[in-house]
Image (cartoon, coloured by chain):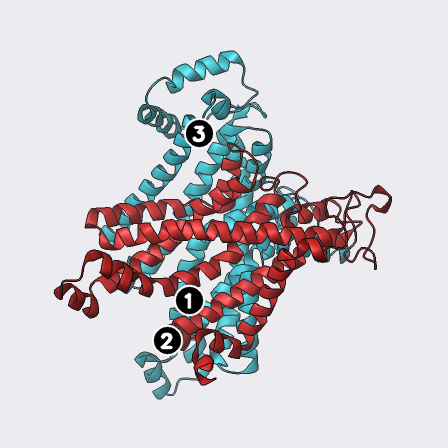
Amino acid sequence: MSAFRHSLLGRLLADPMALFAMVIIAALVIMALLADVIAPHDPGAMNLADRFAPPSATYWMGTDNLGRDTFSRLLQGGRIALYVALTAVTISGLIGLVLGMLAGFGPRWLDNALLFFFDALRAYPTIILALALAALMPRGLSTVIIVVVITSFAEYGRVVRTQTLSLKNSEFILAERAMGASFGRIVFHHILPNVLGPFFILAAMNLPVVITIEAGMSFLGIGVPPGTPSWGATLKDGFDYIRNTPWILLSGGLPLILATLGFTFLGEALRDQLDPRLRKTR
Amino acid sequence: MLRYTFQRIVLALAIVFFAISALYTVMITLPGDPTTVLLGPRATPEIRADFRERAGLDNPVHVQIAHFWGRILTGDMGTDFNRNRPVADSVFSALPHTVALVFGAIFWSATLGILLGAFSADNRGSWLDRLTGILSVGFIAAPSFVVALYSLLIFSVWLRWFPTIGAGEPGDIMSRLYHLALPSFAIGLAWVGYVARIVRASMLEALGENYIRTARAFGLPRRTVIYNYALRVAILPAVQVLGVGIGGMLSSAVFAEIVFSRPGLGSLIYDSVSGRNYPVVMGSMLVAIGFFVTCALIADLINAALDPRHRSQR
């Protein structure tokens, strides 16, 4: 039992904020996975007789301008949000990991070139770049993922580079080298595991950002195709009818706020646990 | 310092050059007729032929990029075919609104963030400090466009405290500020959280420094020591973060401008994208990136001027 208390999960469960975050995330994930089972209505079914129905026992969060059940649509939206977030964070994380280690290990000129490349990518304001690219690319989730990857892998690259650089000259790596360890062994056995800590903290912190970008792009009409029940699309419907049917807007924003809060609190807690140096300054 | 300033300016220019050139390359190498992409669907065949000639679209990519920068440097950003005027006119009439919005957001985040952060550091460990800590993370996590939508609903539609649309009467400063208050608050709220945390952390650090202990030993009032000496040093990292944060604020400004129906760079790009008005998209992009990089540069230089340690870091 005491071993569990000192494990990462055990320590996270002892932190009330982290526990709160994990409950929210677990609830969101379960609702997204079981969306088809839980949903009281077909998320795409239009029922024009019940347009703009206020929240009731039949329609928990009311209906939209086409009489579609908001709650059922939000459940489906959770799937889209989680899918985009996990895919985009994985892709940009992997690109960042490879480029960051290249910069850290490579010759000086490569390091400088990659740093410049990272800086240049950070100059794009995400949503403005999304708008510019959306004008050129077809509307869909792959466009959303591409935009997120372009604007976020540099962040991973920077963190991994800094971490690799500081490890590269540390004593235990020098000792390994002196003992004749191969390059592969040093990278995969020593550097990689030590880089992964900050890497996962960044990934956890990045998930809510990506979820927000997807919702934002869908709100602007440059994300999911029309009719797809993304959270952002629901918010757009709510915005269009803000004066008469505020419940669409209110319930549309709720899962987005919960998701971003949950992942942000989890990221914070992870950082406190994995990086004790930061805990002191808090 | 001079050398550092020079290096930073060159780097900033190189970044703008690279970022815009990359985007332009994507635009001209995409499948399809580049004149459609660069001029928009409303351009007549004569305009297309003329542009093809001037831009040298049959040349290799790097020559075309050189042509593109040649045109930009002479002030020619192309023609806004929807409004029938130069792109520069459209972009520069929208820019001041966005700049006002971003600086309004910085005003909110700096004042509220510094107050909250300094207060937390001063009352470290109290329940108010803990509450501020949780609130800061909450502010950071809340998506700015949901904050914009909710504040529109609550403060404008329900309570009617603030106007719902527009940027106010031209020339009437009070009306302008009145229209600016809510949208800039919606953008700034997230940064209130960041600034509060950074100010709190760096202030706690500063309070442990020797010169603060000396000031205390000399019997200076606690209030003077904390809010005059420690806070002055603690604000510096916040300046840097806000400078870099302007990129994020520009993205949030797109939403704030659309939600509150304000003119500005964001709504200009948004309208141009739906109308396939690419020259305006490209021009707005150039100005947005230029503005962001300039602000980040200024924040960096302010920091370097005030804290020499900063110059040696990268």
Foreground: disc 1 or disc 3: 3
Q: Which residue is mark 3?
A: B27
Relative image position of residue B93 (x, y in whole percent) = 54, 36
Assess disc 3: are there few (<14), some (14-19) or many (≥20) residues with their C-alpha within 10 Å of its C-alpha.
many
Q: For the residues tagged 1 and 3, is the chain the same?
A: yes
Relative image position of residue B70 (x, y in whole percent) = 35, 26
Amino acid type at mark 1: Ile
The circle on residue A33 is none
Q: Which residue is mark 2?
A: B206
The circle on residue B235 is 1
Quarter of the image for the C terminus of chain A: give it: bottom left
Which residue is drawn at the image coordinates 67% and 55% (left, top)? A35
Which residue is drawn at the image coordinates 12% and 65% (left, top)? A178
* Dot 3 or dot 2, earlier in sequence: 3
Chain A, colour shown? red
Chain B, colour shown? cyan
Mark 1 → mark 3, Cα distance in angstroms? 42 Å
Please name whichever residue, A32 or B217, is drawn nearer the observer in this view of the structure: A32
Q: For the residues tagged 1 and 2, is the chain the same?
A: yes
Assess disc 1: are there few (<14), some (14-19) or many (≥20) residues with their C-alpha within 10 Å of its C-alpha.
many
Mark 3 → mark 2, Cα distance in angstroms? 50 Å
